Amino acid sequence: MSLNLSALPVNNVRTVSDTKRSFYAHHTRPLNAIYRRVVEELMVEMHLLSVNADFVYDPIYALGVVTSFDRFMTGYQPESDVSSIFAAICNAVEGSAEQYRRDAEVIKAEVNGLSLETLKRQFQSAQTGGGTILQDTLRAIALRERFKYSRLFGIGLYTLVETVDSAVLEDKEKRDALLSELIEALNISSDKLLKDLELYRSNLEKMVQAQEVMKDMLEAERKKREQRAQAKQATAEATESTPAETSEPSENEAAGQS
């Protein structure tokens, strides 16, 4: 009995390697070493979500992606590569950088200017919707039978709160209580969210410190280059200003010449 290979199922799910190859095909310049891990971890995380059957893209997730990328890529050099890197990440996971940024900006703009109490009410009435993008997004999540939570969604949620009232996030007790209250209506466990956001805040602090160290190193190197250039110029000027040595004839040579 011969085996009919054409009848066997074909696994067309993209692999992490496929996604990485796609990224480096779209962005061909080398990555700055200090940021390479940031880029690849974000890309892998987005890849794993994109191939998960329970995952559904939404604007809060988009805001998390954009915010995470922008904050962790602060100070990247050359700066002109940043937009290319983000576009390559989105393309690699079969998305669009334009859509991510557009959806992130729209949902962030919707909450800008709201009071914290108004934001709370929108989450508390998540199952009824309301017509805005945020309310419709919350309703879809609350009614979904199997919502795939992600760290990037958590960062998006955190950014919404930050946009409304950043001060409340500085107090850990108030922050944790507020975030737990917001996601209660979405049927999401607060334990994972709070751990993810604590790590997010910690990593941001570490990245800022690393960027400061890199900035100091670059400044020190710049000063060394300037000092070497100044020393070289001073040597050249000293050489040019030194008169050429001439030999004076001795008395005997002078007498002989006369």
Image (cartoon, helix red, strand yellow):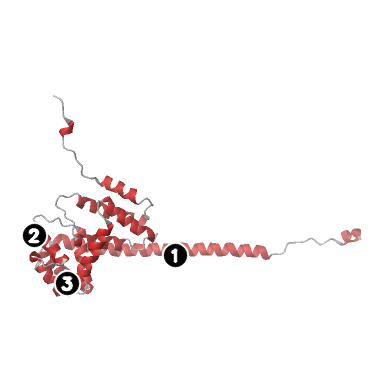
206 horizontally vs 156: left or right: right
Going 32% across and 64% down the picture, which residue do you hit?
208
Q: Position of residue 213 (x, y in %)?
A: 38, 63
Q: Secondary structure at mark 2?
A: helix
Residue at point 14%, 61% (across, down): 191
Q: Label 3 to label 1, Cα distance in Å? A: 40 Å
Q: In percent of the image, x 20 and y 68: which residue is there? A: 160
Residue 219: give its label: 1
Kind of residue indicated by mark 1 = Glu
Location of residue 242 (image quadrant):
bottom right
Check disc 3 and report the residue beneath it: 174
x and y percentages locating residue 45 in the rendered image: 23, 53
Instruction: Please give left or right for residue 223 compared with residue 178 in the image.
Output: right
Badge 3 marks a residue whose secondary structure is: helix
Residue type at mark 2? Leu
Q: Quadrant of residue 3?
A: top left
Q: Residues within 10 Å of mark 2 (few under 14, many from 20)?
A: some
Q: Earlier in the sequence, mark 3 or mark 1?
A: 3
From this viewpoint, is residue 188 visible? no
User: In this rendering, which labeled residue sits more in front, label 1 or label 2?
Assistant: 2
Please identify the quadrant where the C terminus is shown: bottom right
**Marks 2 and 3 in Cβ contact (< 8 Å):** no
Please name whichever residue, 209 or 140, is drawn nearer the observer in this view of the structure: 140
Q: CA distance from mark 1 to mark 2?
A: 53 Å
Q: Amino acid at mark 3?
A: Lys
Disc number for residue 143: 2
Tally of numbered discs = 3
Front residue of 72/102: it is: 102
x and y percent of residue 126 in the render? Answer: 10, 65
Which quadrant: the N terminus? Answer: top left
Quarter residue 240 falls in: bottom right
